[in-house]
Image (cartoon, helix red, strand yellow):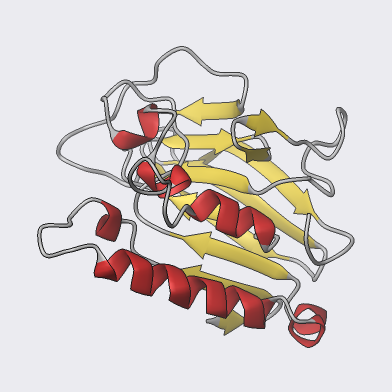
């Protein structure tokens, strides 16, 4: 869906986990994603909508201790299925210059540095989110659940910030070159517990 200067792509991460009736849906979705990204990255499309933001339920990266898929370095969403690593989404998104992947599933909030294949790809030391060299991942699953929060483990060097407060994330698209994000804490009566601005001065591939 296109909204303003952003091309949003919502997809299912669950097809990688529920394969009782086959894996055709993984291939079908992957091919659809690739075709959509091809259209979204034409010069004409990027001139109108330079931002590409993807959204799915399960994250590719997280640092919780609940032994879920994203705790493992070979997350099937990120690296693909089977030993052949078929249909890996992280490589696909990186190759087409996707700016961000927003997910949930974990009942907390977590912001990563720009990253690809566990390598931090900050724009610079002083301005990591200005012209980053890889996608930014955010886990925003803290709106509330009777299962309560998921605990964090030791903080990896690819994680910028974590929060266990109940809350929500607010995104503001300022222009074709600037988007800001704020994490609002319900536990702290609406306090902003995290904020950052993503700046991209040139659209296209990394």
Residue 165: tell me if it is visible.
no
Position of 172 relative to 167 (above/below): below
- The residue under the point 67% across, 64% down is 96
Q: Which corner quadrant of the image does residue 185 belong to?
A: top left
Q: Locate residue 73 relative to residue 182 in the image: left or right.
A: left
Identify whether 165 is placed above or below 141: above
Name the residue located 65 percent from the left edge and 38 percent from the top edge: 115
Indicate left or right for 47 with 72 as reference.
right
Left or right of 199, for residue 16: left
Residue at (49% x, 35% y) in the render: 110
Furthest-top residue in this view: 154
Q: Nearer the viewer, residue 119 or 173?
A: 119
In this picture, is 184 found above or below 187? Answer: below
Residue 103 or residue 172, whichever sits in front? 103
Q: Quadrant of residue 8?
A: bottom right
* Residue 188 found in image quarter: top left
Q: Quadrant of the C terminus?
A: bottom right
Instruction: Count all numbered tags in the image, as a single digit.
Output: 0
Q: Position of residue 60 (x, y in %)?
A: 45, 42
Residue 167: tell me if it is visible.
yes
| Outermost bottom residue | 44
| Residue 179: % across, % down | 72, 59
Decide if residue 49 is on the left or right side of residue 105.
Answer: right
Residue 12 x/y as whole percent: 33, 63
Q: Residue furthest left?
A: 20
Which residue reaches farthest front?
Answer: 84
* Residue occupying the point 59% across, 82% down: 2
Where's residue 200, x and y in %?
82, 57
């Amino acid at each position: 869906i296109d909204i303003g200067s952003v091309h949003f792509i919502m997809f299912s991460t669950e097809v990688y986990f529920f394969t009782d009736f086959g894996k055709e849906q993984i291939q079908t979705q992957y091919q659809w994603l690739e075709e959509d990204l091809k259209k979204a990255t034409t010069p004409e499309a990027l001139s109108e909508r330079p931002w590409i933001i993807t959204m799915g339920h399960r994250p590719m990266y997280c640092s919780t201790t609940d032994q879920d898929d994203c705790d493992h370095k070979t997350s099937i969403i990120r690296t693909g299925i089977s030993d052949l690593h078929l249909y890996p989404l992280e490589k696909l998104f990186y190759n087409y210059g996707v700016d961000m992947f927003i997910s949930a599933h974990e009942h907390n909030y977590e912001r990563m540095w720009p990253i690809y294949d566990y390598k931090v790809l900050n724009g610079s030391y002083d301005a990591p989110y200005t012209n980053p060299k890889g996608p930014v991942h955010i886990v925003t699953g803290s709106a509330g659940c009777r299962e309560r929060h998921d605990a964090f483990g030791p903080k990896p060097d690819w994680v910028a910030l974590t929060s266990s407060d109940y809350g929500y994330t607010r995104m503001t698209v300022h222009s074709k070159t600037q988007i800001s994000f704020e994490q609002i804490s319900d536990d702290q009566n609406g306090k902003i517990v995290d904020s950052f601005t993503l700046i991209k001065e040139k659209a296209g591939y990394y």
